[in-house]
Amino acid sequence: RFSKGIHPSTLTFQALRIAVNRELHVLTHVLPQAMDLLAPGGRLAVISFHSLEDRIVKQTFRDVVGDEDKAHKNKYAQEIADPQSGSFRLVTKRPITA
């Protein structure tokens, strides 16, 4: 019997799904493309479903905004063209939850 929490097979399936679908890789490539498509004054909202996605989104936004104190690269991050341009700003630094 399992006590409170998530069944171990759920986590295993989630890890397999993320790997097979290359979800983290796709996310790192889609975010810069989405930013390039924004109209001046446009907003980009990203819904993340787990902490791995959330971390990538936050780091990408910090890199683009140029938050030197918190910006850092990880193995999923990619270079963003001209992050010092100042053309992006964070509307909120904290996640919005339902």
Image: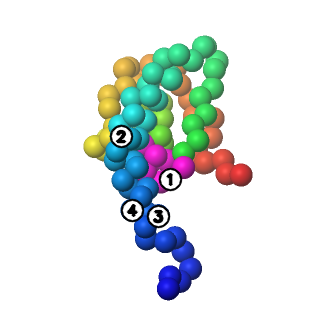
The structure's colour scheme is rainbow
Q: Which residue is mark 1?
A: 50
Label 2 sits on residue: 22
- First in sequence: mark 4 vs mark 2: 4
Note whether residue 50 is visible: yes
Q: CA distance from mark 3 to mark 2?
A: 18 Å
Is residue 14 toward the left or the right of residue 38 in the image? left
Ranked by sequence position, the earlier of labels 1 and 4 is 4
> Disc 4 and disc 2: Cα gap in Å?
15 Å
Secondary-structure class at tag 1 = loop
Circle 4 SS class: helix
Q: Which residues are magenta?
A: 49-56
- Against 51, is 90 above or below? above
Where is residue 87? Give x, y as percent. 52, 20
Q: Specify the amino acid type for callout 1.
A: His
Bin the neighbour count of mark 4 within 10 Å (Cα to Cα): few under 14, some 14-19, many 20 and up: few
CA gap, disc 1 and disc 2:
15 Å
Q: Quick one: label 2, few (<14), some, or many (20+) residues within 10 Å?
A: few
Residue that numbered label 3 is attached to: 10
Local crowd at mark 1 within 10 Å, few (<14), some, or many (≥20)?
A: few
**Residue at 32% from the left image edge and 28% from the top image edge:** 79
> Residue 22's image quarter?
top left
Q: Nearer the viewer, residue 67 or 59?
A: 59
Q: Which residue is most to the left? A: 75
**Picture coordinates of residue 70, whole percent (x, y):** 42, 45
The tally of labels here is 4
Report how far apart the C-alphas of labels 3 and 1 lie in the structure: 13 Å
Circle nearer the viewer, 3 or 1: 3
- Residue placed under numbered mark 4 in the picture: 12
